[in-house]
Image (spheres, rainbow, N blue to C red):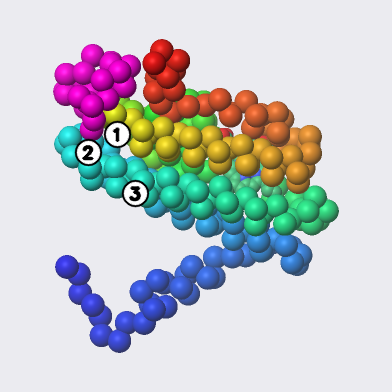
Amino acid sequence: MTAHPDGMTYADYLQLDTLLSAQAPLSTLHDEMLFIVIHQTKELWLKQMLHEVGLAMTLVGADRFAEAYKALARVSRIQSVMTLSWDVLATLTPVDYGRFRDVLGTSSGFQSAQFRELEYRLGIKDPRFLDYHEGGTAGHARLKRAMDEPSLWDMADAARQRAGADSWLSVYRDADRWFELYQLAEKLIDVDDALAGWRHKHVLTVERIIGGKTGTGGSAGVKYLESTLTKRAFPELWSLRTQL
Ligand code: HEM
C-alpha cells in the first residue's frame, strides 16, 4: 500500500494541472481542440490496453486462464469505446479540418508508438514501422523491445503446446476437452475483431473528412488505410474456421 498524503485533492491525485495544460492548439480555430482531445484520449486508452495486454501475457504464461479472460475482456470494452469515438470526430467536417490541417505539418498517426506497440505485442510485427521512430528515442526502444519479446500470440501458442493440444484446429474440434484454450482463443478473436472494426471506422471517417487526399504522414491516405484492413494478429484462429 502507498501513503495517502493528508489533504490530497481530486486534482492532486489525477495531476489535472499537468493533464489539462497539455492541450495546446496551434491555430485559433475552434475545432482544433476536438482534434487534440480525441487523439490524446486515444493515447490514454492505448496506454491502458498495453497495461492489460501485459497482464494477460503474464497470466497466459502461468496458465491462469480465467484471470487472463478478464484482462482481455477489458481490452475489448476499451476498443468498443475507441471505435465509438469516431462518431465524435465525424462531426468535424472537411471544411473545419481543412482550416487547420496545415498546422499538423508531417505529424501523423503513423508515428503513434503506442499503437504500433499494441500491434507488436499482439503479434502483428512489421519491422518497417520501427523506421518511423529515430534510433535512440524512447519510442524506438519500446518498439524494439516489443519486436524482440514474445507476443501475446506466442504466449497463447506456448500454452497450447504445454497443455498437449496438437493444433488450434484440434482445440476447436474438441472444444469440451480443451475448453480453457478454446475460451482463450475466442477472447483473442474478440480483440482482433474489434481492432479490425476500429480500422474500418478510421478509414471511413478519414474518407469522409479528406476524401482521396494523401495523409499528413505521406501515405496514399485512404488507399493505404484500406490495405491495413486485412491485418490479423491471430491469423491461424481465423483460418481454422474454414476447416470446422
Ligand atoms: C481528421 C482526422 C484524421 C485523418 C484525416 C486521419 C488520416 C490518417 C491517414 C491518412 C493515415 C495514414 C498515414 C498518413 O499518411 O498519415 C492515418 C494513420 C493512422 N491514424 Fe489517422 N486520421 C485521423 C484521425 C485519427 C485519430 C482520431 C486516430 C486515433 C484515435 C488516428 C490514428 C491513426 C493511426 C494509429 C494510424 C496508423 C495506422 C496504421 O498504420 O495501421 N487517426 N490516419
Q: Which residue is mark 3?
A: 51
Where disc 2 sits, the SS reads: helix
Q: Quadrant of ligand 1?
A: top right
Is 199 drawn above or below residue 91 in the view shown? Answer: above
Q: Earlier in the sequence, mark 2 or mark 3?
A: 3
C-alpha span from label 2 to label 3: 17 Å
Q: Earlier in the sequence, mark 3 or mark 1?
A: 3
Where disc 1 sits, the SS reads: helix
Quadrant in which residue 184 is drawn: top left
Q: Which residue is mark 2?
A: 65
Query: Would residue 61 be found to the left or right of residue 127 on screen?
Result: left
Hey, what amino acid is under mark 3? His
Within 10 Å of the Cα at label 2, are there few (<14), some (14-19), or many (20+) other Cα atoms? some
Ligand 1: does it lie within 8 Å of the C-beta at label 3? no
Quarter in which the N terminus is drawn = bottom left
Q: Which residue is mark 1?
A: 183
Within 10 Å of the Cα at label 1, are there few (<14), some (14-19), or many (20+) other Cα atoms? some
Hey, what amino acid is under mark 1? Gln
Q: Residue at x 72, y 62 (%)?
A: 31
Which one is nearer the viewer's eye here, 233 or 99? 233
Q: Residue at x 83, y 53 (%)?
A: 95
Which one is nearer the viewer's eye here, 198 or 33? 198
Q: Which residues are magenta?
A: 159-180
Tell me if residue 120 is in the magenta stretch. Answer: no
Is 140 drawn above or below residue 81 in the view shown? Answer: above
